[in-house]
Amino acid sequence: MIAASMMTKLFHRFASVFLFSVMLVIVPAQEPGPIAPNGRDVLVYKDGDRVLGKLVEQTAATIVFFSERFGTLRVPASDAVVIKSSVSPAKPPIPPAAAGMAKVKSGKSPAGARPAAVAGNVETAAERAEVEKVSRWEWFSPALLTAKLANFFGPWHGKVAFSDEVVSDTSDRDNVSLEGTLQRKWAADEVQLKGQYDYSKTNDLTTTDLLKGDGLWRHTFPENRFAIYHPSFEWNRANLSTSPLVPGGDYFLLQQEIGVGLSIWSTPIRKVRIGVSENLFDLWSQDPVPSHNSRAVESAFVESEFKLPWRMSLTQRAVYYYSIASGDTGWESTVELSKKFTETFSTSIRHEIRRNNPDGRAPDYTRLKLLFGIDF
């Protein structure tokens, strides 16, 4: 009966993913392009149209944008957003309209010209309310959403995701999960930051209240060698354990992983890495009495990243823990299949499993999670 119930839940969730995918395929979406090269800015309208050029001036009410193809454009700030280039190009020639605006600023307005500050001002409370109303609807436009997030985070990329998941450990239940990811890459370095919050109730009883976070710094050396530092924490405020070997009660777990490895396969679409690490576990528990203990455990890991057709990707990380001092072993694995529908919206299926965690407190689990995300 339990297996049949889980299969029914999984069928409903995969059916939902399929219908969602069909809808996104049938309804064409205008995808915003990448940040413009060669030092050019991008003017993105609400309907997804884009113009390459240079931002001349931007106020709370008006955007003045110069394009070599269309000349100088004056656009209400509520109708578009500008993605600023991260490249500092040579200063372009000032267009005639921009020169006229400079005269307005200096007090030498041409005859009959209306100052930009007057032309773009919102003069009434009703108009201000309408602009605010329009700006709220901007966040439902994929193009505008991507542009605003790109401007806010700059060279950082990431994802904000939510999910409804099926969990199988000591019982079967539904969880709600929120996640956030930030990452940035340089020539020889990579930084990742992740946060996750899981919460669920069963018969008005809180069965999951878990906050997790982790970071990753990877530095690549010549000859495909690399070093990593991977700190993470887990704060469980509703740890319900029925196993006599794993005590219940709230706990805070801090893990620090320092390791080295070798990239045995590295191409633009395929990456496979292997390595060894030293792990330091610090555990603070509240029940039955407040306590703190630490232990060091060795581990071996394998990581893989594959870019697949149809804008899909597959990532995996598996870790095998072993203690030279005590002989204890444990392992964990995460596999995720992702699909991007547009530059903004994506979905993924993630399988997580953990067995005999070396800290001695974190419970074992098997999770199958479906996520819908907003990428930037």
Image (tube, rainbow, N blue to C red):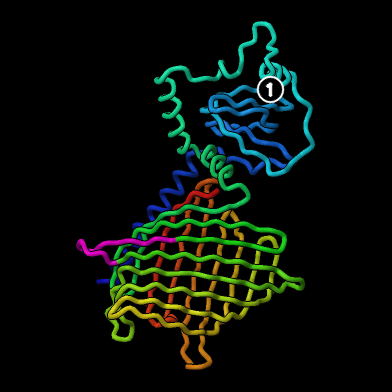
* Residue 226 picture quarter: bottom right
- Tell me which corner region of the image, top left, top right, bottom left or bottom right, holds residue 186: bottom right
Left or right, 312 with reference to 4: right
Report if residue 282 lies within the magenta region: no
Q: Which residue is disc 1 drawn over? A: 72
Please tell me which residue is depicted at 53% across the width and 46% down the height of the picture: 344
Residue 82 x %, y %: 60, 34
Boundaries of the magenta span = 196-207
Q: 10 Å neighbourhood of mark 1: few (<14), some, or many (≥20)?
A: some
Most extreme residue toward the top is 111
Relative image position of residue 143 (x, y in whole percent): 54, 38
For the point 43% across and 52% down, which residue is it? 18
**Eyeballing the image, is 317 above or below 324?**
above
Amino acid marked by disc 1: Thr
Q: Does residue 4 appear left or right of residue 29 in this picture?
A: left
Q: Secondary structure at mark 1?
A: strand
Q: Nearer the viewer, residue 264 or 241?
A: 241
Tell me, yes or no, if residue 299 can be seen here: yes
Rendering coords of residue 52 (x, y %): 68, 33
Residue located farthest toward the front when viewing the structure as drawn:
107
Q: Quadrant of the N terminus?
A: bottom left
Tell me the chief SS of the magenta region: strand
Q: Toward the viewer: 312 or 53?
A: 53
User: With respect to residue 53, does 198 lie above or below?
Assistant: below
Of 365 and 19, the residue lying toward us: 365
